[in-house]
Every structure is written in C-alpha cells, then in structure tokens.
Amino acid sequence: MSQIALIGAGAWGTGLAIALGRRGSHLIRLWAHDKDIADAISKRRVNEKFLPGQKIPDCVSVTGSLEEALRNAEVVVGVMPSQHARQLFQEMRPHLKPSMLIVSATKGLEQRTLLRMTEVISQVVGVDGGFQPRMGALSGPSFAQEVARGDPTAITIASQDGELAEIVQREFSDPRFRVYTNDDVIGVELGGALKNVIAIAAGVCDGLGLGHNSIAALITRGLAEITRLAVACGGHQETMAGLAGLGDLVLTCTGGLSRNRGVGVELGRGRKLPEIIAGMHGAVAEGVFTTHASVGLARSRGIEMPIAEQTHAILHEGKSPADAIRELMTRSVKSEIALSSSGL
C-alpha cells in the first residue's frame, strides 16, 4: 500500500483524503492543525467544520503531529493555506527525506516574497534543508465538496520530474478522479493562484447586479491577464487553455461553492472585507492574499493587469466596486488578440 501524508485538513485536504481513500489501496494520514477537527474526524469520520456530510474512509487516520503524519510517507501533499506554507514546511523539514515525493496542492502566492508554492518549498527544503526535493504542483477545477461526493473531476499534476508526475497520476486517479500530467509547473501554479483574483472580480459583478455579458467579458479578459503574466514568468501559453487555466477560472468565477467569488459578491453588495472574512469562520479565500501578490509580481515583470489592479483597489484601498468596474470599462480600447504587456 502507498503511504500518503496530507498536510492540511481544510475542505480541499479533506476532499483529497476522501478521494484517495476511495481506492482502498493507500494508507493516508491527514494532518490537522485544529484539535477539534482532528477529534471530530477520529470519532465521527466527518470534518464537520469544512466538509460536513462527507464520510471519511477508515483508511484515513488523522493526527496533530507532523512527525507522525510524515512517518514512512512516500508522497507528501501540501494542502495548507499559502501564507502558512513556509512555516509548516520549516516545521516539516526535519522529517522530510530525499525519497519523498512532495506535491503542492495549495493555490496561492506567498504575499511577502511573491513566490509560488513550489518555490517556497524549494527554498525551505532545498536551500535550508540540505537536499533538493522532488516536487510537483496539483491544480485544476475541483471544488472539494464535489470531489468528496464523487462527481467526475479532472485535474493536472505538473512537474519537471516525469517519474513523479506518472506516479501521482497512477496513485491519485480513479474512475471519478482523472489526473492529467503537465511539465509546465510555472503555468499550472500561476493559473491556479491567479484565477482566484479574477473570481473575486466576477463576484463583484454579480454583487452589483450585472448580468452574464459582464461575467463572460471579465472571465475572457481575465484569462488574457493571467496568460500574459504566466508567459512573462516562463509559463506556457497553451497551459492557460487547459485545466489549470481556463478550466479552473471558469469554475471559480461561476460556481456557487467558490469562496473567492463569494467574497466578491459581498463586496459588490457593499459589505467591508473584515466583516466578510469574519463571517467565513476560518475558511480561507486565497484570492484576498493573491491579489496583492499578483499586482506586485506583475509590476516586477512590467505587465499590466487592470482587473487585478482594480480588484486590489477594492480589497485593500477602499475603492468603490462600481467605480472600479467603471474605470475598467472606460480604459482606452485595444486589439483583442495581443499577448504584450500593455494590458486590456
């Protein structure tokens, strides 16, 4: 049996544990920071806080000890919020071994450094830990609730390590959870992170009462923004037309289960960000952090991202959502087909 450690017992970590546990061929340890969550899973086999109503298979054990979670693990999956990734991998470092395959399933950028998650892991484990880890990034359109209940889902594992990608594809796939491979780690990670920014903007449009025309335009031009930045950072344009690009963008901008879209909806209705976050009861909308990081990354690469910039102004500068949309629509008109840095 394969031994898999999942570090993070939020909705996505729990959903992955359920999907992997369905196969019955894995021993899975799920690390939970919150003792109440760990106790609830141990006693009732349900993560009532983040994924209520979804039974967790008996092959999934839960622990609050990173050492125990990582003991004899062959695959280690990081499913923690992006802003906690560095600290957690620093704590995990003494228990990681060069033979372990590390998969990042976190969709975000580190706010302070603007780094992607595999860059953070490489820095912590490779530079400070004494060996370069074998890594990949798991991303794509995947609401945890739907994965857990067995809705057909397709995602991608991106790695420059072809053997790692094939192992993850083989070990994670089942008839209801299809894993494709990709070698574009940069594109897959940026697609997964930046779509959350556009989803907040899509939610703002919804909260303002705008219709389908507005959302369709926002998704399409948002994809152009993401593609420009991903290509400037070394990603591949074609990745943005795939699962980790267009697929995840459409899901997160339109799906009712999207936390990032939900934050945007409430902003569009006039609520303030601190009040919205307080009402999420510990759930994380990664786009709130990634918006700040994406604007910083775009500026460092000389790329204009007007949707991200206006979303940042709404989130962090107190700008009126209506004023932000108006400013986007009154920008000077340009050719649609362009991958230059000149913006929308």
Image (cartoon, rainbow, N blue to C red):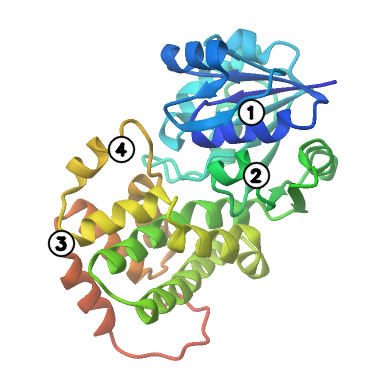
Residue matched to label 2: 138
Quadrant, the C terminus: bottom left
Residue matched to label 1: 126
Question: Upstream in the sequence, badge 2 or badge 3?
Answer: 2
| Secondary structure under the numbered disc 4 in the rendered image | loop
| Secondary structure under the numbered disc 2 in the rendered image | strand
**Residue 149 location in percent, x, y?**
62, 41
**Residue 190 location in percent, x, y?**
54, 54
**Residue 122 location in percent, x, y?**
61, 33
**Which residue does the image show at 52% across and 15% down from the upper left?**
91
Residue matched to label 3: 319
Q: Are marks 2 and 3 in contact (CB under 8 Å)?
A: no
Question: Upstream in the sequence, badge 1 or badge 2?
Answer: 1
**Which residue does the image show at 69% across and 55% down from the upper left?**
184
**Residue 342 location in percent, x, y?**
41, 79
Q: CA distance from mark 1 to mark 2?
A: 20 Å
Where residue 241 sits, quadrant-wise, is bottom right
Q: Amino acid at mark 2?
A: Leu
Question: Upstream in the sequence, badge 4 or badge 1?
Answer: 1
| In front: label 4 or label 1 | 4
Question: Upstream in the sequence, badge 1 or badge 3?
Answer: 1
Residue matched to label 4: 280
Q: CA distance from mark 2 to mark 3?
A: 34 Å
Q: Amino acid at mark 1?
A: Gly
Q: CA distance from mark 1 to mark 3?
A: 41 Å
Q: Is residue 271 left or right of residue 62?
A: left
